[in-house]
Image (tube, grey):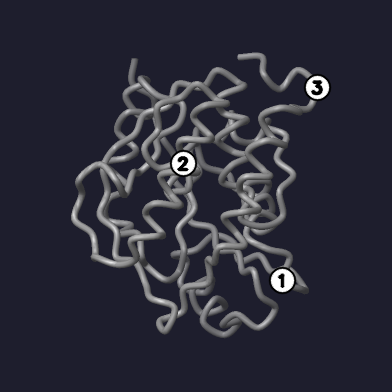
Amino acid sequence: MAVAVLIGFLVWSRRATSYPFFLGVLAGTGLVQQVLHHPTNRGKGAALRTGIAAATGNVIVAQDADLEYDPAELPRLLAPIKEGRADAVYGSRFQGGPHRVLFFWHSIGNNFLTLASNMFTNLNLTDMETCYKMVRADLLKRLPLTAERFGIEVELTARLSQAGARIWELPISYSGRTYAEGKKITWRDGLAAMFHILRYNLFPPRGKWRER
């Protein structure tokens, strides 16, 4: 059964100094309904949780400002949710979509973390760490998310699995950056992700949030 979808545009900033003038201009144009700021940089997870709480549409998806992910592909990701077949759709960088050729060890690390996550969630994802996780808003808002930094990717995947969400995965393009161009993920984030995989899968919070 198809469902009606309302999409709003919400911008949240992880840094107190992140382009306040530019974000204010966006809000003034009406293209963005809200601009939210954290006084200090609390991390990606904290920014996402603030955005999720304030969002008013039927679906929610994160879009990083560096445009490594192409927002023109979002309508295609929306289709399984709009058609009533999915509760969440992941955009996979590793399903054959066009992509910039970059770091070998990054791809090995991503594949290993996805494999480790799949072993605990019993999912068969190819890209657990993708930024593009489009989720029905009513489902996403009831998930007990607590991660402050990049652990939000692991936690969201674990909570969706624990809630019995219907997850689809579609190929997307990816225009990654080098460290010289501003890439910030390092091997330390990979080690932290392994800890988060164990933490969020072995110790889910209690409550009625899993009820459909």
Q: Residue at coordinates 55% horizontally, 35% vertically from top-left?
A: 157
Q: Residue at coordinates 48% horizontally, 39% vertically from top-left?
A: 59
Q: Label 1's element?
A: loop
Q: Label 2's element?
A: loop
Q: Amino acid at mark 2?
A: Met
Residue 202 horizontal/vertical position (percent): 71, 27
Q: Amino acid at mark 1?
A: Asn
Q: Amino acid at mark 3?
A: Arg
Vertical arrangement, residue 191 with respect to residue 32, above or below: above
Vertical arrangement, residue 47 with respect to residue 112, above or below: below
Front-most of 164 and 201?
Answer: 201
Give the image quarter of residue 162. Answer: top right
Front-most of 103 and 24?
Answer: 103
Vertical arrangement, residue 85 with respect to residue 59, above or below: above
Badge 2 is on which residue?
Answer: 128
Q: Quadrant of the C terminus?
A: top right
Residue 23 horizontal/vertical position (percent): 54, 76
Q: Residue at coordinates 63% horizontally, 38% vertically from top-left?
A: 197
The disc at residue 206 is 3
Residue 132 horizontal/vertical position (percent): 42, 48
Label 3: few (<14), some or many (≥20) within 10 Å?
few
State the separation of the CA atoms marked 1 and 2: 24 Å
